[in-house]
Image: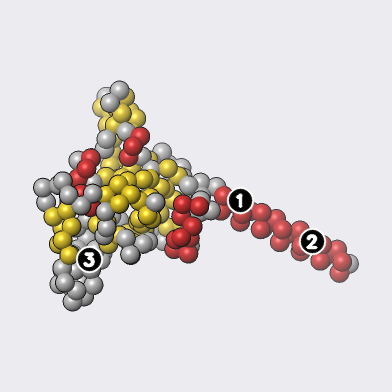
Amino acid sequence: MKKLVTILLVAILAASCICVFAACEKPLADTEGFSYMITGDWNGWNVNTDPDDETKLDAQYVMEAIAVSDSRVKSIKDQLDGVKLLYISEHEFVNEGASWDITVSLTNGATPSVFNGNMAIKVLKVKYETLGDESSWSKAFIPDPQTANARTLTPDTLYIPPFSEVETYTGSLTWKDNPVALEAGTYYVVFAAFTDGTFGLGLIAK
């Protein structure tokens, strides 16, 4: 009897491990019809569509759903506990070209740093919807004042202002301001949605 119980427990444990492994290997994609894309000054902070088909997104800005086991996010895997959606894209940040700048103190009391507007980035949650005779792309920015609390997954490469209406400290910016890449270069842009309702953004050097 004890032997049978032991065998059953081992079988249950093995099945559980297989399920956990399978979940780790499965791309964590949105199941409600939403797509995710990167946006910034470099594409007009807007939904960019395929020039030949407005019902499709411009592929260069669309994010790809990936599994937690994807090698491209290996360096931040410990930041992904409780993740339910996980997306990635690639973007080259250039610290010039936009007509505006971002000035931010990265820590309390730090000398303010100035970045060109082309170093700013957000994620757009989008969906092509039809209402009556009209069809269009709905969009929601992440992070966004009041609704989308996002944190940085890579504080060495991406600064996200505190989720606050007022500056947490002088120069920290507020939730009305944009996340900013801290160095020019080509990165994997990572977007994560968590089961607690929060979001994460990160930049992993390619």
**Amino acid bearing label 1:** Ala
The residue located at (19%, 45%) in the rendering is 41
* Quadrant (top left/top right/bottom left/bottom right) for the N terminus: bottom right
**Above-or-below relation of 128 to 109:** above
SS at circle 1? helix
According to the picture, the residue beneath numbered tag 3 turns out to be: 164
According to the picture, the residue beneath numbered tag 1 turns out to be: 22
Mark closer to the chain start, 2 or 1: 2
Observer-side mark, 2 or 1, equals 1
The residue located at (32%, 60%) in the rendering is 157
Q: Residue placed farthest to the left in the image?
A: 99
The foreground one among 109 and 200 is: 109
| Neighbourhood count class around disc 1 (C-alpha, 10 Å): few under 14, some 14–19, many 20 upward | few
According to the picture, the residue beneath numbered tag 2 turns out to be: 8
- Cα separation between marks 3 and 2: 52 Å
| Neighbourhood count class around disc 3 (C-alpha, 10 Å): few under 14, some 14–19, many 20 upward | some
**Above-or-below relation of 201 to 29:** below
On the question of residue 84 being in view, the answer is no
Mark closer to the chain start, 1 or 3: 1
